[in-house]
Amino acid sequence: MKNNIKLFDYNLPTELIADTPRAKREQAKLMVYNKKTDDVMHSTFLSLDKYLDKGDLLILNDTKVLPGRLFLKKESGGTVEILFHKSIDKYSFICIFKSSRKIAINSKLFANDENFFKVVAINKNFITLSSNNDPMTIFLKYGQVPLPKYIKREATKDDVERYQTVYAKKLGSVAAPTAGLHFTEDILLKLKHKGVLIDYLTLHVTYNTFKPITVDNYNDHEIGSELCDIRENLISKIKLTRQNNKKIYTVGTTTTRALENYATKSYQGDFCGEADLYITPGYEFKIIDGIITNFHLPQSTLLLLVSSLIGREKLLNLYNLAIGNDYRFYSYGDSMFIQL
């Protein structure tokens, strides 16, 4: 079948799965692939400025990771695990939850004796909770960094800092926009000194971003939506960059999806709302000239997005090349820069 997700599989040695960050962010390896010339270069993230020109525009996602995993006690004494999904208003929010036994509507779930949530609704594996206090303060005080499931260890104090970009600003994600984890203040400063333009948008990453595809035909997968905020000033900067015949590069699949969602739906001016664009092979990109991104899980929506840029066969060839050169994979792994 043409759209079979199993075509987007590859074999990764387990020792190349990065379950801890490198000692320093900028030490990440960087594979640079130029689609026009079909050239591949191996570098480090510290040398990123060599591959961008004065006047190019680099766009990053300034969302901030919430310690969004909480273990709550039911009134009956059992435990419920929740993972933040998105806010409804100041006091209500939706979570993904796991519980060994049924949870009653209107019952209470306790973080401790003083802080609890009331169960408003349950829909499949989503639970709506409300609180008399700001729930964000409870997550910040008692929550855990929600590391990906393939990292088989408990989150540490080091993860609180390292599973967060240095430019994180707006709280609301349960996963880091991992392509940005390699940036340091010095790298950003070096890019600015070269004349590279840097700007930001916000897309709050939810479980939808890394939800596994469980159907054979990836077009049948439900991508869901995530809250996104794009300012008109950024759109104006994109237009000016294009007029000046310079390149527009995104940092990460979340930034890419947010911008392409904006363009595909022909929005104008400021936009704050849900982004639900599902990018699969065959999609025609409307804004970007390239992407900085990590190496993604097999059979994932993120792998589909990157395949849409350069083709499945080429991408899997590059992944095999990365494996042969001991690149580290996934959230704490190394990086690639695709130039179209």
Image (cartoon, rainbow, N blue to C red):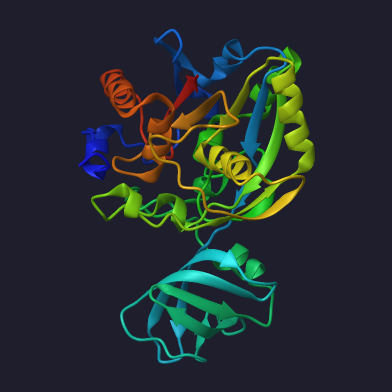
Q: Looking at the image, which is closer to me, 157 or 322? A: 322
Residue 252 x %, y % = 52, 36
> Residue 179, relative to residue 161: is it above or below?
above
- Going 53% across and 62% down the picture, which residue do you hit? 68
Residue 73, position in %: x, y?
45, 82
- Residue nearer the viewer, 25 or 267: 267
Q: How many circles with numbers are drawn on the protein?
A: 0
Residue 33 lies, with reference to residue 173, above or below; the image says above
Residue 24 shows up from this direction: no
Nearer to me, 334 or 321? 321
Q: Is residue 297 above or below residue 122?
A: above
Left or right of 314 on screen, residue 80: right
152 vs 174, left or right, is left
Q: Quadrant of residue 114?
A: bottom right
The image quarter containing residue 123 is bottom left
**Quarter containing the N terminus:** top left
Left or right, 185 with reference to 302: right
Question: Which residue sits at x=70%, y=72%?
Answer: 90
Quarter location, residue 232: top right
* Residue 72 in view here: yes
For residue 187, side relative to residue 176 (left or right): right
- Residue 218 lies, in percent from the top left, at 31, 48
- x 58%, y 28%: residue: 288
Residue 256 vertical position relative to residue 319 in the rendered view, above or below: below
Residue 216 point in image, percent of width and height: 23, 50
